[in-house]
Amino acid sequence: GTGSVNIFMIGGTNAGGPGFIGGSVLQGANKTTAVGDPLNKRIIILTTMSGQPVGYAYSDAAGHFSFSNLAYGSYKLFGDAGGKTHPALTVTISATQPSVNNVVFEENNC
């Protein structure tokens, strides 16, 4: 059968700044396609360390995602795939490291 579900997301607030966080979402182990293949349309969520939403992004056809115009500080970054655990990754950007562009998420079968 088919059905629908309403999803209500809390709006994010990005204070703005010179920072950047980006990376890729890739196929992990134990799936039907090759390990390392890019995954399209996977949502990545960015929050403050206290859990306040900053924004979200979807991976593109090459598996890439990015968040720009971020204030310096520490953030929680996590993927959200149905039926999977979503441990947060802490990412810190600062004047000495304004960009983090090598974050990799792998989607496995567990």
Image: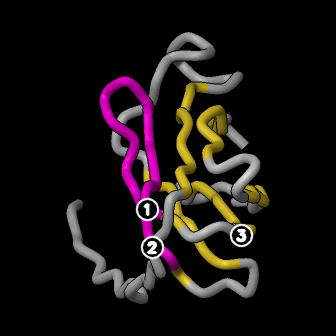
- Cα distance in 3D space between marks 3 and 2: 11 Å
**Which numbered disc covers residue 40?**
none
Pointers 3 and 2 in contact (C-beta within 8 Å) = no
- Cα distance in 3D space between marks 3 and 1: 12 Å
Q: Is residue 89 above or below residue 7?
A: above
* Snapshot colouring: secondary structure
- Magenta region: 54-69
Q: 10 Å neighbourhood of mark 2: few (<14), some, or many (≥20)? A: few
Q: Residue at x 56, y 36 (%)?
A: 23
**Which numbered disc covers residue 73?**
3
What's the magenta bit mostly, secondary-structure-wise? strand
Pointers 3 and 1 in contact (C-beta within 8 Å) = no
Q: Is residue 94 left or right of residue 46?
A: right
Type of amino acid at the residue the image marks with label 3: Gly
Q: Relative to the observer, which residue lies in front, 58 or 95?
A: 95
Q: Which residue is mark 1?
A: 69
Quadrant location of residue 107?
Answer: top right
**Which numbered disc covers residue 16?**
2
Give the mark, 2 or 1, whose residue is nearer the N terminus: 2
Q: Secondary structure at mark 3?
A: strand
Q: 10 Å neighbourhood of mark 1: few (<14), some, or many (≥20)? A: few
Q: 10 Å neighbourhood of mark 3: few (<14), some, or many (≥20)? A: some
Q: Is residue 94 above or below residue 103?
A: below
Quadrant location of residue 7?
Answer: bottom left
